[in-house]
Image (tube, grey):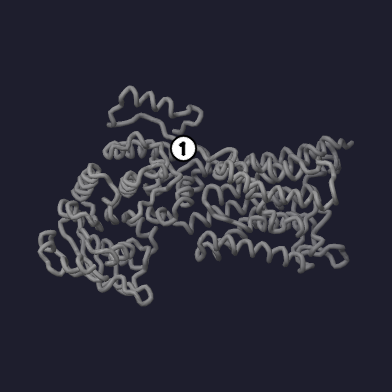
Amino acid sequence: MTLLECRHLHKAFGGLVAVKDVSLRLEAGEVLGILGPNGAGKSTLLNIVAGSVRPTSGKVLIDGVDCTGSPPHRIAQRGVRRTFQVAAVYPRLTVMENLLVGLPVRQGESLVSVVGPGRRWRTQERADLQSARVLLAQFGLERKENLYGEELSGGERRLVEIMRATMAPVQLLLLDEPMAGVNPRMMGVIEDYIIELASRGIGVLMIEHRMESVDRICRSVMVMAQGGVISSGTFEDIRRDEAVVGAYIAG
Amino acid sequence: MSNPVVYYVSLLSVYGAVYAMACAGLSLEFGITGVINFGYIIFQAAGAYTAAVLTLGPSSPSDFQHYVGGAHWPFPLPLIAAAVVGAVLSAGVALLGIRRLRSDYLAIVLLVASLIATTVATNATTLVGGDAGLALVPHPLVSLFGNNAEGVGYNLAYAAGAAVLAAACFVVVHRITESPYGRRLRALRENEFAAAAQGISAFRLHLVVVTAGGAMAGLSGGVLVQYISAWAPSGWLYPETFVFFTALIVGGVANNWGAILGAILVPLGIGEGVRYLPQIGSATLMVALQWIVIGLLPLIIFWFRPQGIIPERRRRFVGARVDAPVSPDSLLEEAELVDPSRMEV
């Protein structure tokens, strides 16, 4: 079944049409790149899928279920995780806490259980700490787990946000410019990680301006301009598309 | 037998416990979760009226005071009812306000609600006694102490009971704060949008937290009114909420120990401390001075120590590391970083 399907999405903010008749399909294990000049409606599209913007018309289906207009936390509970254009780490939570918040609510974590006797959540948390540390080590941040989110550099915040998004059993990942502000060495790590996630069957929808990264990790690419899709196909296809070149020069 | 010193000490202890209960609830709402409840005093007042009315007995037309819903409920039912009314009223406000309003607007609405509530209580003279309020509220379990509410034994027992309830509120708030549940609340405080992207429902958690905080406020009101045996609108005007906020800011926002310290330092310390100053100018000057100090305190704290006296602590995790190669100097660094008294897990 198609993991994500958008049908004729349309979003107008007053007179401004941000997204115009956008349809797309994303299969499990696929990485779809969205390119386009600033103001093309890429982030609005991602926000619609994530539930933070309600489309004027059109439908969003996740795993075949109509999720149009569902609030963001409900979408997230379906195994959809997103990152933000400006990395949204929790400034006064440590890196480790940031990661742990990414996990879904487990047994023993309800209000009644945490107030009641014992600390049933401790056992689970110990296991979670281990998996979080494995992830931190993969990104070379193992020495920073006790730093506050606000003490990290911009690039590190982005890494933490991506890690946090994948702490939960995620099936669809929405990334808004994951490479922005990240140093070149870490870009490679992020690219490898996205490829690894896709090989695990996770679908990734990724807005990215960095062509090298898109070329390397996206099986298919969609180019947006002024709210609409102007081209789609493989990276090679769209690179030869004159409409794309035109949009970037005009945009 | 009555002993003025013991009486004064127990009075201070009861006040301290009442403030601590209320500050624990507000710490959960504001310090941990970031809900700006500028109408917090309403829920303490509601608890106080509930406990008063449910012990005073039915109101008769010939009475000097008039109120709705009088009954003679035995201890501890009036206190439980006080907590329940505080919780239900808070949940109602949350259902109306939190779903639609972002934090600062909610704060404004609650502040206005606080003004409306005192105006209504003052002018609806048959609702809860009007401007004069309610008096002669019976003391609970006083028959066990020879019906002597002024006695040393009763006062000490009441203070001890209040302290136990305050400790219970603190434990509840603290257990929530230090659990994964509390971590989600703090995430919500830090960034509501990011939290929603992690599957956290801001509305649901805000509702839970405001209800729990309201229960503690209501309970604190009940404990207070059954001790001082009187309650009137002048005691819960909207600025009283800011006394609690000042307490949190001084003690340390987002640290429950700070909330308790603030409860002791600000309402109790300043409220009582002013009494020991020599009388200068008119009698109203001293009351005004008290408010000036309470108004200045947050400014001073924000300027010199914004995190408060006991800041929110950094929650470090310790435990075996996996995969990451551990070099001797990283172990050393870790040993220096981790304060054993603050270990988790």
Subunit that carries the residue with mark 1? B
Q: Is residue B252 above or below residue A11?
A: above
Q: Quadrant of residue B72?
A: bottom right
* Badge count: 1
Q: Is residue B61 left or right of residue B73?
A: right
Give residue A140's quadrant in the image: top left
Look at mark 1 in the image and give the residue it sits on: B315
Quadrant, the C terminus of chain B: top left
Residue A126 is left or right of residue B37, and the answer is: left
Asked if one can make out residue A168 in the rendered structure from this viewpoint, the answer is no
Spot occupied by residue B15 in the image (x, y as percentages of width and height) = 73, 44
Count residues near mark 1 (Cα–Cα under 10 Å), then give few for <14, some for 14-19, many for 20+: some
Between B3 and A35, the one lying in front of the other is A35
Using the rendered image of the protein, determine whether residue A28 is visible from the camera's viewpoint.
Answer: yes
Outermost front residue: A249
x and y percent of residue A165 in the render?
32, 49
| Quarter assignment of residue B152 | top right
Q: Is residue B136 toward the left or the right of residue B99 in the image?
A: right
In the rendered image, the residue lying farthest to the top is: B328
Above or below B332: residue A15: below
Please provide percent x and percent y for residue B62. Answer: 88, 66
Label 1: element kind: loop
Q: Residue B110 location, x and y as percent?
A: 61, 62
**Residue A193 located left or right of residue B137:** left
A16 vs B243, nearest the viewer: A16
Residue positioned most to the bottom: A15
Q: Quadrant of the N terminus of chain B?
A: top right
Residue A251 vs residue A34, the one in the foreground: A251
Residue name at image x 37 percent, y 48 percent = A102
Residue at the spot 52% in from the left edge and 64% down from the top edge? B101
Residue A68, compared with residue B135, is above or below; it is below
Question: In the image, what residue type sits under mark 1?
Answer: Arg
